Image (cartoon, grey):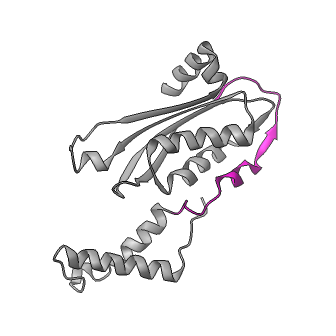
Amino acid sequence: MDEKVFDKRAIARIEAAVREILIAIGEDPKREGLKATPQRVARMYQELLGGVDVDPRQYFKAVFEEKYDEMVVLRDIPFHSVCEHHLLPFIGKAHVAYLPQGRVIGISKIARVVDALSRRPQVQERLTSQIADLIMAELDPQGVAVILEAQHTCMTIRGVKKPGAIMLTSAVRGLFKSNPSTRAEAMSLLRG
């Protein structure tokens, strides 16, 4: 995925904010181990949040006319995002199914869509819907189903501290929503 390149002013602002955080918690940002921390954190945010200015519709240029009308499933797409409530990561897998209507997309583009939408401050519920809605809008399939499963560090390392808890979200559109047997087939394939 093309990464967003923060401009120099944005990088400087992040670095200044990190220095202020270090001072606020009683640390010395000039201490040997912390001297380069503001720069490292700025680079980290650039990497983790590089999807903020990426338009994921660009990945739908690799759409092909194909008389295929059976389910297409791509499972276990690794993703990471940042919870917009605590700015902590959530990490998991995306599973995407669609029922073509004369058009298919290169499978790597589905993974790129997941990356572009996940690499911004998010909540898992919205991310799940955004993936499904974008595929419906751009590919015009008969239906789309998306399942995300993720561990949220905002609840595994802080707060309730429940490591191992997995959050599952789903979004179904078109025939996957209106036809129970099509939905059941998609869900069985998506879960493996």
Is 57 left or right of 190, judged from the image as shown?
A: right
Give the residue displayed 73% in from the left and 48% down from the top.
Answer: 60
Residue at point 43% right, 82% down? 12
Report the magenta residues as a range.
Answer: 50-72
* Image quadrant where residue 28 sits: bottom left
Q: Is residue 90 above or below residue 31?
A: above
Residue 68 is left or right of residue 118, and the answer is right
Image coordinates for residue 190, horizontal then vertical, percent: 53, 27
Whether residue 127 is in magenta: the answer is no
- Residue 105, quarter of the rendered image: top right
Instruction: Give residue 34's position: percent from left, percent from top.
Output: 25, 79
Residue drawn 20% across the image and 84% down it: 31
Identify the residue at horizontal 62%, vertical 23% (top origin).
176
Q: Is residue 91 visible?
A: yes
Does residue 58 show up magenta in the picture? yes
Above or below residue 120? Residue 66 is above
Across and down, in percent, residue 24 comes to 21, 76
Q: Position of residue 156 (x, y in %)?
A: 26, 45
